[in-house]
Amino acid sequence: MSFRDVSQVLDDSRSSGAHADWPLGLGDCQRLNAIEPVSSGVGLMARALVQTTIPHSEQRSLHFQRRNGSLRLTMVGHPDHGLPYGKIPRLLLAWMARKARTAGSPTIELPTSQAALFRDLGLRMSGGRTGSMKTFRDQALRLMKCTIHIDRQIDGGETWQPYQLSSGIRLWWDQPAAAPATAGCWIKLAPSFYEEVMTYAVPLDFRVLVALRSPLAIDIYAWATDRTYRLHKPLSLDWSVLNGQFGADYGRLVDFRKRFERSLGQVLRHWPDLRIRTDARGIRLRPCQPHIIPLSQ
């Protein structure tokens, strides 16, 4: 099963109505962001990584799992680096997919300097042992070198496919000291991941991704953007279900609820028309206008 196949069957059984793909073609993507830099335009996220999310915080284990209905995402970290977590990998994923889609190539040519990339990603650049440059390098290597497994139960059977996001990277810190300043740095997306972002991905407002402080808020925003596009009737989800999809070591379910509601508050500041409410049982999402509207509509 290809990643496009996975995306096509990721219609959650908890809602009704026909499944709808995002009609966002390469031409639409280019027009949406022909003038503005990526950091103030549109980012793209593979839908499997919207429906099940990567870690929010550092994991002691090299294995991580999230489940959403019949979909299960398993991540295996590289022994030398561990699993990616937090905000930076999410920004990188959205940025890389956007760059690949715009260029029409799996090879993403990186800016000539780390400072230029940090500007594209909306990150502040700082050095030192605890600076953002060290954190970025650590998270980039964790992301590029991890392996992802997607399992999906369909018609009583199970499909499975492993993949890596990247099939090769050359970054600034890998350059020999004698390399010229113009020597190129690049990231090459693995074929299956490149196919996913070229044929199907969820468009997101990159400005919102940058502005949101917590990785959970980013995940809620991405999920709600995708869900409202496909929603035809109110959707109710229990806290236990949400914890299985979004939770990441928050301890008790009541702790997860508090963190979710706090992160949802961040999202609503950027998307006040999102029709969602919480109560003691869970959340209720009502049909509303998506935060990103494809130009083909």
Image (cartoon, grey):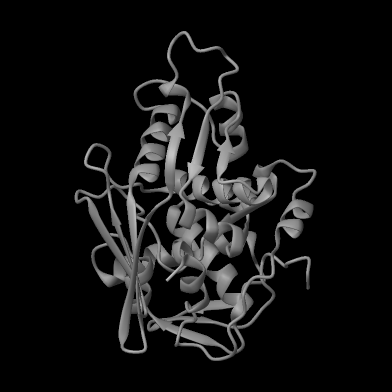
Q: Nearer the viewer, residue 20 or 185?
A: 185
Q: Nearer the viewer, residue 43 or 135?
A: 43
Going by the image, does 196 lie left or right of 253?
Answer: right
User: Which residue is found at the position 62% from the left and 79% from the top?
Assistant: 20
Residue 119 image position (x, y, % from top left): 61, 33
Residue 287 image position (x, y, % from top left): 63, 82
Outermost residue to the top: 178
The N terminus lies in which quarter of the figure? bottom left
Q: Nearer the viewer, residue 273 or 279?
A: 273
Above or below, 228 relative to 84: below
Q: Is residue 18 visible from the viewing direction of this image? A: yes
Above or below, 1 relative to 283: above
User: Which residue is found at the position 37% from the left and 70% from the top?
Assistant: 245
Residue 232 image position (x, y, % from top left): 62, 87
Q: Which quadrant holds residue 155?
A: bottom left
Going by the image, does 172 lie left or right of 31?
Answer: left
Residue 190 image position (x, y, % from top left): 46, 49
User: Which residue is found at the position 36% from the left and 54% from the top?
Assistant: 56
Q: Is residue 122 visible from the viewing direction of this image? A: no
Q: Which quadrant holds residue 279?
A: bottom left
* Number of marks present in the image shown: 0
The C terminus lies in which quarter of the figure? bottom right
Above or below, 230 relative to 111: below
User: Which residue is found at the position 33% from the left and 65% from the top?
Assistant: 247
